[in-house]
Image (cartoon, rainbow, N blue to C red):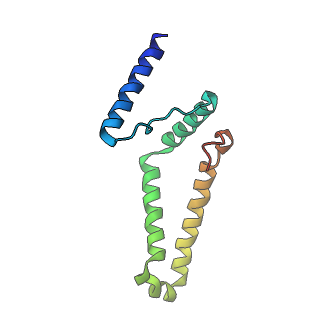
Amino acid sequence: MPEKEEDIAVLGLLQRKFRKNFGQDDMLKCLPVIWPELAKSKSRVESVFNHLSNKNVTQQKVLEFKKQLVSNKSLKEYFKTNPEEKEILDNDIKKAHMRNDRFLFRSLDVMPSYVIP
């Protein structure tokens, strides 16, 4: 029970700070949360976080660079004369998206409905 009183005191302090800094009383609101569904979201976030590595970040940077090359206006003439190079870049981009989609959508079935747009 003391935890609840402490939580209420902290909430009151935060509300006073918001009122003082922003001039609004209703900035901080309590939302009903279904804890088992939130735990599923937490495992999803942890999964994505664990997937991050220097190698994956580098791959994403290379992918973004390839996208910029393909969409670059000054390189359009070059790609008209060398369509096979543009095709190679397009294929690389498509393959990377297929790999990413497989990872990203793998655990959407455990996501709570209110988290998915």
Q: Residue furthest left?
A: 21
Q: Nearer the viewer, residue 94 or 16?
A: 16
Q: Residue furthest right?
A: 109
x then y, percent, for residue 110: 66, 38
Query: Vertically, is 85 above or below 29?
Result: below
Query: Vertically, is 91 above or below 107?
Result: below
Q: Nearer the viewer, residue 91 or 106?
A: 106
Q: Residue at x 57, y 54 (%)?
A: 100
Q: Is residue 42 left or right of residue 18?
A: right
Within the image, what quadrant is residue 96 found in? Answer: bottom right
Q: Residue at x 44, y 62 (%)?
A: 62
Query: Vertically, is 59 above or below 83?
Result: above
x then y, percent, for residue 72: 43, 78
- How many numbered discs, if any? 0
Q: Nearer the viewer, residue 16 or 107?
A: 16
Within the image, what quadrant is residue 26 found in? Answer: top left
Q: Is residue 29 left or right of residue 35?
A: left
x then y, percent, for residue 66: 46, 69
x then y, percent, for residue 15: 39, 31
Q: Residue at x 47, y 76 (%)?
A: 71
Q: Residue at x 57, y 34 (%)?
A: 43
